[in-house]
Every structure is written in structure tokens, then in C-alpha cells.
Amino acid sequence: MFAPGEFDGQELGHTTDEITGAGRDLWIEAVRVALVIAEVVAKEVARRRQQQWEQASKDAARKIWEERQRAEPVLRAALDEDFWKDPTPQDIGRAWQTAIEWGPSDPEAAAVLDHMRRELADRYGLVPNDVQLNVADLSKALALGAPALRAEAAVAREDAERWGETSSLYVIRDPNDPEQILHQGELRTVPGERLEAAAARELKEWARTHGRELDGTIGIEAVTNDGTPGGGSAAAQVTGERAEALIKDEAQWQRRLVSGEEKGSLEEVHHAVLAEWDRTEDAARLLGEGTEGYDGLREATARLALQARAVEAEMRGEEPRHVYQGATLRSKLAADEWWRTATASQVAGVWSQVGGWPDSQAKRETTQLLQNHLFVRHGLDLESTTPADAVAELLGGAESDTPAATYADRAADARAKAEELFRKSADAATDSARLTREADEMAALPGADLRAAEDKRNQALVAAGQSYLYSAQAVSAGGEAERFEATADAQAEKWNMEIEPEELREAFRQRFGHELDPASVEKLTVSASRAAAAAVPSSGAGPAPSPGTAPESSVRETSGASGEMDPEGAGAIRVAGAGLQRSARLRRGRPAAAGVPQAPPMRSRVPSASSGIG
């Protein structure tokens, strides 16, 4: 039925299949068991992890809560007004960092952050980013934003604007420790002054007063004083090791400007001249008067002062050479010798020269000086527009080769000469009468020496001749005085230079600030009339009274009026009643030339003024 071996093969195959199926089942069961075990283990691990995570979350939450509790006082403090009255950079930095850390997840911290932004902007002009504050910048802003310095800076801005200067704020600190502010203040510079050099001088002065070395351990930082809280933009920064070199370089540059070796703006040249002036004055002060070189420094100071005035004239759009010409004229006019010998044409020439200048301060000052000299020396009260030929005419005429003098003064001199000649004539006549009497007495004596008596009579005749000569000369001088007075009167009428009572009243009001009372006005008018009458020469014999002399009774009467009115009115009446000399009657109250101060050149009130806090 089966071939040989056929049954054995089939049986073997069947047996193998059974074995294979049983092994697969066992494997599947083993896998199933393994999966069950793995699931159980995984669930246990997951359960344990969940427990651990929950525990970690609780710990983290507790830690976060604790950190938030610690941050609470810092955040709350930043909302308090007292916090911002005098905070340190560290206080603000800590509060800012805390608000930055909690702001994204905490609305209260975000509100604190917004509040700090507003406060930093309003108080110190700081607009920080959302990362962190620069403590060095914050220290500088706090120093410059201090309430006291802000108040000073506001006043300084107004003052600087009024004077045409520039105001800056500054801090001094160690570049290696920028968080520590050593000093802060306000620095002033004038037009033409370099801020960097001014800051270097300020740093040098601070180091000197505080016993610090001028080295790299200190530096000054200046910012614009534009009203921005905490200071404006950076303007200059100088370290101690650079300060001396900057100061020296500026001085050398200024000397080149003064000498004209280097060109600059008018403001720069003006400041350079003033700075060199100050340095020269300091050098002269250190040398001391009487030492070698002192006089040279004083002369240099005078030249610099004149140069400063010339530059100021050019800054005003005026001709600077007139400043130098005016100085030369002032030197000439100050010499009495020039006035004693100058003719009318020479004086009028100077007047014409100055009058031909364009309007300028130099012209006004020199004209005023001329007016004062002419008033004090000749009694002429001239307007600045008076023509030069009128000046020559008033001083004796352009053709005159004698020293300049008004006809009123010439008349006074002639009148004084006439009086002196009349006195000599009277003295000679007295001598003649005495000698004649003595000769008669000698001749009447027994045994008289008739020759001696005759000699006496001859001496008497000589004295009588001298008396007649003096009298004739006096009459001639009196006639000359009358002619001069007539000319003076004509000029006074022509140029309207007489002082009338109405003008006296106006002068009184301007001087004393109120009107004369009615009694004073009446007395003044009467006294002026008496003074005018007293000035008329008498028609009787003998010498005419001096034009400057009033009758004694007139002087006494008007002087006694002081008890009837206010002292100022009495003083005015005494002047009118005394009978003014003609030259004095032409005056209107100008001050003497020596009493008119010359305006000083515009100088920096303080070359680099500063004040500080700290």
C-alpha cells in the first residue's frame, strides 16, 4: 500500500508540525505574559512619576510663592513717593530688575514697571529698555536730577540766556568706579570759550580744593543744560590726565588769536583777549609793584583792555580803529598843557575830526569827553551836533593864534586886568600925594634941605605919571572887556546859551526830583534879576566891579533866605544871587571830566563760573 519509506516520511512531517505548533503557542503565551508584566511595570512607573511630578510642582510652586513674597516689599516700595525723594542707584536698580522679572506673569509687577518708567522719565529723563538699567548712567542721572541742582540749573539757564552765555551741567567721578559720583554742578561758558577747556579748568580746580591728583582716577562729564531731567546730551568729557594739556593748548591758541597769527570768530578773539588780559593781570599781581617786569605787564594789560574794546566795537558793527583813535585823543586831552596852548582852530579841529566819525560808542564817549573838557575849562555846554566852526567862533575865532578862550572868559580876564590897573593907579596916586606932602613938610622946616624936598616932589610927579598911565591902561582894558562882553552877549543870544530862571527851575527839578515851592521861585527870580543888575559896570568913577562879584548886601540878603524855604531852594537862590561869572552862567550842570567814568569793556562776569552740590 505504501511504497518503501513513504509512511515514515509522512509520519515524520506530521510530528514536526505538531511540535512546531506547540512551540509557537508557548512563545505567544510568553510574549503575552511579558506584555502583561511590562504594562504592570509601566503603570507603576507612571504612577510613581506622577507622584514625583506632583511633588516637584508643589515644591516649585512653594518656591515661586516664597520668591514672590520676598519681591513684594521691593515692588511695593517703588510705588511709594518717599522712595523717589532720595533713592540710590542700587535701590532703583533692584526695584527695576524685580519688576522686569515678575512683570510678564504678575499684573501687579507689570504696574510697578510702568510706574517706574514714568518716574525715571519725569525725574531723570531716563528711558531704559526692558532688560536692565545701566547703573553708571543711572548714577549720573540721579546726580544731575537732584532737586537742588535742578532748581539751580533752571536759574542758570535764564541767567546764561540773559548774558549770552552757555550753561552746562557736569559730574565728576572716577572712570574706574562710575557708580560713585564725587561732585556735580553747573558750568558757565561765554561766547568764544571752549567747553572742553572750561571743563578741564573746573576739574583742575576741584582736584586742587579736594587734595586729589589730576590723573586718570578722576574725570568730568558735561552735558547740556536744556531743561531735560537728568541733563541733556553729552557735551564734553575730560579725564584728569588730559586736563593740563587742554588748558595749555587753549592758552596757546588764544595767544595766536590775540596776536593775529591765527584767525577766529569775533567771539573767540574777544574771549581770547579777555583771557590773556586776566593772565597778564595775574602775572603782574604775582610780581608785585616795583619789581622788574611789572611795568611792562601793566602796559600789556592796558593794550589788551584797548584791544578788547576794539573787538567789542567790531562785534557791534562799528569801526574798531576809532577806538584806538579815541584812546589817543583821550590821552592828548587829559594833558593840561595841550589845553593851555591849543588855539581855537586846533580845538575845533579835534571836534570836527570826532564829529566826522560814524555813530559809534567810541564817537559818543570821545564827544562826551570833549564836551566835558569844554564845559569845565571854558564853560561851554555844547550839543554834540554843534558845528566845528561854531566851536572855533566861541573860543575866539579860527584865525586867532592865541590859546583858545571864550569871549566871556576874555572879558573876565580883561576886567580883572582893569581892576588890577585901577588898583595900581590908586596906589600910585596915593604914593604921589604922600610924597608931595612929605616934600612940603621938609621944605617948611628951618634949615630945610630944599634939594631933598625937590627930589621928593620929583618922585611924586613920577608916581602921579604912573597913576595916570595905569588909569589909562585900566580904561583901555575896561573898554576891551566891554567889547569882549558885547561879543559874548551876542554869541550867547546867537547860540541860546544863557541860563534863565525858568531853566534853573527845570535843572532844580531834574536834580532834586521835585519842583521849587512858590516862595523859592519868587526869590529865585528876584535874585537872578539882582545878579544881572550887579553885573552891569557902574557909570561912576573908580574901577568897575568884577563880573563875578555881587554887592555884599545882595549876597547877605539871598543867603539869609535859607531860613525861609527848603535848604535845596536856598542853595539855588544863593547861586543866582551871588552873581555868576559869565563863563559859569553858561554851564548847565555837566559833571567834571574827571567825574565821568569810561565804560569798561564787556568782560566775562566769571570766565568759567560753576557751582556744585556734593
Image (cartoon, grey):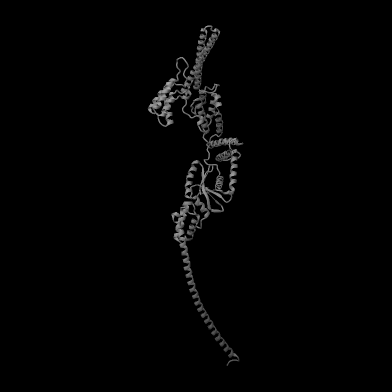
Nearest the viewer among 349 and 82 is 82
| Front residue (pair 465, 115) | 465
In the foreground, 77 or 474: 474
- Is 417 rendered above or below residue 216? above
Instruction: Report if residue 480 is visible in the image.
Output: no
- Position above or below: 336 against 142: above
**Which residue corresponds to the image point at 51% horizontal and 53% vertical from the top-left?**
139
The relative height of residue 150 versus residue 344 in the rendered view (above or below) is below
Which image quadrant is residue 281 in?
A: top right
Q: Residue 259, position in %: x, y?
A: 60, 38
Q: Is residue 140 visible?
A: yes
Residue at the left extreme of this rendering: 518
For residue 291, side relative to residue 569 (left or right): right
Can you name the residue that lies furthest to the front here?
446
Q: Where residue 334 appears, x then y in whole percent? A: 54, 29
Tell me where residue 421 appears, x and y as whole percent. Answer: 51, 17
* Residue 75 drawn at (x, y percent): 46, 58
